[in-house]
Image (cartoon, helix red, strand yellow):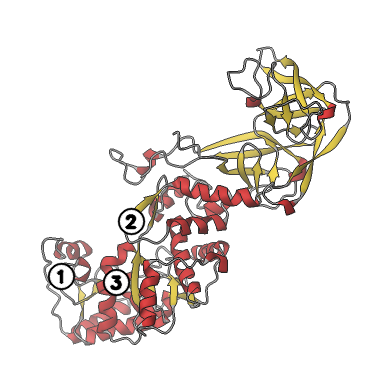
């Protein structure tokens, strides 16, 4: 992991350096605290890199803490997926904790606030609390239950805990300042009645803490020195500090905010992603068109490319939108260095080499990866009948067409020069096969007489061809901001109708049979393709990870 940690500074590290120099903290401990109510997405990848990367830079610790304070939406399925994603990205946590580990402690803190006269049970409904809170320009109004006695509040909170009251009937609020210019400080709710089975604590609790209350207490109880959060929690920081200072907790944590990753043409809202899944718009959370980490992994994105992307966009204080093309560029850069090359024909057209001996085959050696000399070479079968791309042949070629046509000789990658001879057509005049002749002295793509050939085609031997399915994935949305496009009432109206094209009967050399799932190849002249998890030895499925160049610049 040392190669991931660069010495370039950012404002978070500047704050930490200052804290260490002034002796505020003697070490650095961070945490990554996702809520297990969905799958991680590309935005979480940035937070993971910041949380774990900061701890590694300062030789400190980073814990994984699952924020399981809302049992209605949480599940162990999400816990397992979160752990898998973090490990796949290349990070290791020091410990695994849950907010539920601290439920007893958090509850004791709530009782302490009641004893201090700084928390009260409120009977107002959620809508009434919202109405009483006021606006950014008008102060809030005090609840008629705000001045209950300490004894009454303790009794009511005990009864809430014992399950006497129904969901939504009562809450516990901190008593701070209903006239504060910061709405988060206007007597925030810190506990609510929620009769729901918890995936870890079972039916022990009928009340659960709110995130704003559990978050600072969990951080400090756990020993976190620097609580790194996304920018939307900046206005919550006074509340974070108020809880820690009021409860006089030792070694309080410091919250530092950074800008979230906003990536165009994507959705990261868990609610909207869930709609895509439940409505069958995508095949699941790991659909290769999704911006989830598992979806990117299934599409063939390397973990190193995602980390590189997070490093390139850096750590900022202001929100901005990152171009999806930058992520794709990071993927291309990485795969260009490590992906083995393979020849695959996606839309096959048969070529018959008339003067090549019938029944003869030979093995043609090609580089596994020209950018990696140590990768060596691999052999593919050459025979009299081949497949090339349909687009690589034209009977009436346009100007600048350097592929196979009646007037031009071409080179077959790693093999021979080829000349057009004739065509076979069906009853409707469609070309079903092209007859050619080859120059046996041009093996390896070079002619002894020095003649030049501009066009080089990839090909697959018909004798060694295996049929595979190829999924050509594109961006899931047509607009840069699918969540908030002007004039659109439903974000699904922004879906790209051409986000997937399924090609059957594509041809690859049989040497690819037995490839491990997840292996990504560069299909020559096509792009990068990853073997999908639904593949079998008799039914190989490849997902296009990314094209060889950015096709969206023109769009």
From the viewer's perspective, tell me whether residue 383 is left or right of residue 541.
right
Give the image location of residue 121, x and y in percent: 21, 76
Mark 3 vs mark 2: give the one in front.
Answer: 2
Earlier along the polypeptide chain: callout 3 or callout 2?
3
Q: Disc 2 designates what residue?
A: 319
Q: Which residue is mark 1?
A: 180
At label 3, counting other C-alpha atoms closer than 10 Å, the crowd grade (few under 14, some 14-19, many 20 or more) is: many
Query: Is residue 72 positioned above or below 466 on the image?
Result: below
- In the image shown, does 118 or 435 lie closer to the viewer? 435
Give the Cα distance between marks 3 and 2.
Answer: 32 Å
Q: Position of residue 254 (x, y in %)?
A: 34, 76
Q: Which mark is residue 192?
A: 3
Mark 2 burial class by Cα count in 10 Å: few <14, some 14-19, many 20+: some
Residue 120 x, y percent position in the rendering: 20, 78
- Tell me residue 65's x, y (percent): 45, 72
Which type of secondary structure does the marked residue at label 2 adopt?
Answer: loop
Q: Nearer the viewer, residue 469 or 281?
A: 469
Image marks 3 and 2: residues in contact by CB distance under 8 Å: no
Residue depicted at 43% across the width and 51% down the height: 273
In the image, 125 versus 47, the foreground residue is: 47
The numbered mark, 1 or 3, whose residue comes first in the sequence reads: 1
The disc at residue 190 is none
In three-dimensional space, the C-alpha distance between marks 1 and 2, rounded to whole angstroms, equals 26 Å
Binning the other alpha carbons within 10 Å of mark 1 as few (below 14), some (14 to 19) or many (20 upward) gives: some
Quadrant where the C terminus lies?
top left
* Tag 1–tag 3 contact (CB < 8 Å): no
Q: Which residue reaches farthest front?
A: 450
Mark 3 lies on a secondary structure that is strand
Label 1: which secondary element: loop
């Amino acid at each position: 992991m040392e190669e991931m940690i660069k010495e370039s500074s950012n404002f978070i590290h500047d704050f930490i350096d200052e804290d260490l120099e002034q002796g505020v903290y003697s070490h650095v401990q961070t945490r990554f605290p996702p809520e297990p109510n969905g799958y991680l997405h590309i935005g979480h990848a940035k937070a993971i890199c910041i949380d774990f990367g900061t701890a590694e830079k300062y030789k400190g610790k980073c814990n994984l803490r699952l924020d399981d304070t809302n049992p209605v939406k949480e599940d162990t399925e999400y816990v397992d997926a979160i752990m898998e994603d973090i490990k796949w990205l290349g990070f290791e946590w020091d410990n695994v904790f849950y907010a539920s580990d601290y439920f007893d402690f958090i509850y004791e803190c709530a009782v302490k606030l009641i004893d201090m006269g700084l928390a009260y049970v409120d009977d107002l409904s959620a809508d009434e609390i919202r109405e009483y809170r006021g606006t950014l320009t008008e102060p809030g109004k005090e609840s008629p239950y705000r001045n209950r006695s300490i004894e009454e509040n303790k009794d009511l909170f005990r009864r809430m805990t014992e399950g006497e009251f129904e969901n939504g009937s009562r809450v516990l609020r901190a008593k701070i300042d209903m006239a504060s210019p910061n709405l988060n400080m206007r007597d925030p709710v810190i506990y609510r009645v929620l009769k729901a089975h918890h995936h870890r604590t079972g039916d022990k609790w009928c009340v659960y803490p709110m995130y704003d209350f559990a978050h600072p207490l969990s951080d400090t109880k756990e020993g976190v020195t620097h609580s790194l959060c996304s920018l939307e929690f900046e206005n919550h920081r006074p509340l974070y500090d108020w809880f820690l200072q009021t409860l006089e907790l030792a070694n309080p944590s410091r919250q530092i905010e950074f800008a979230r990753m906003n990536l165009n043409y994507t959705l990261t809202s868990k609610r909207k992603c869930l709609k895509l899944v439940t409505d069958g718009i995508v095949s699941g959370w790991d659909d290769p068109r999704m911006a989830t980490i598992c979806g990117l992994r299934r599409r063939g994105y390397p973990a190193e490319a995602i980390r590189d992307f997070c490093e390139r966009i850096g750590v900022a204080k202001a929100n901005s939108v990152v171009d999806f093309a930058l992520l794709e560029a990071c993927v291309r850069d990485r795969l260009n260095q490590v992906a083995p090359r393979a020849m695959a024909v996606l839309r096959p057209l048969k070529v018959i080499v008339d003067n090549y001996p019938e029944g003869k085959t030979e093995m043609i050696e090609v580089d596994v990866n020209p950018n990696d000399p140590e990768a060596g070479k691999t052999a593919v079968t050459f025979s009299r009948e081949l497949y090339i791309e349909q687009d690589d042949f034209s009977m009436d070629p346009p100007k600048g067409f350097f592929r196979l046509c009646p007037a031009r000789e071409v080179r077959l990658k790693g093999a021979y020069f080829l000349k057009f001879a004739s065509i076979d057509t069906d009853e409707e005049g469609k070309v079903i096969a092209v007859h050619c002749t080859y120059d046996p002295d041009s093996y390896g793509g070079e002619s002894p007489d020095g003649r030049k050939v501009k066009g080089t085609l990839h090909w697959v031997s018909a004798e060694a061809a295996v049929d595979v399915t190829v999924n050509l994935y594109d961006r899931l949305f047509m607009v840069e901001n699918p969540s908030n496009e002007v004039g659109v009432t439903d974000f699904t109206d922004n879906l790209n109708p051409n986000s997937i094209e399924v090609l059957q009967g594509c041809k690859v050399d049989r040497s690819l049979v037995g490839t491990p799932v997840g292996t990504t190849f560069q299909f020559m002249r096509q792009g990068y393709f990853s073997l999908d998890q639904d593949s079998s030895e008799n039914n190989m499925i490849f997902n296009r990870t990314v094209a060889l160049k950015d096709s969206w610049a023109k769009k």
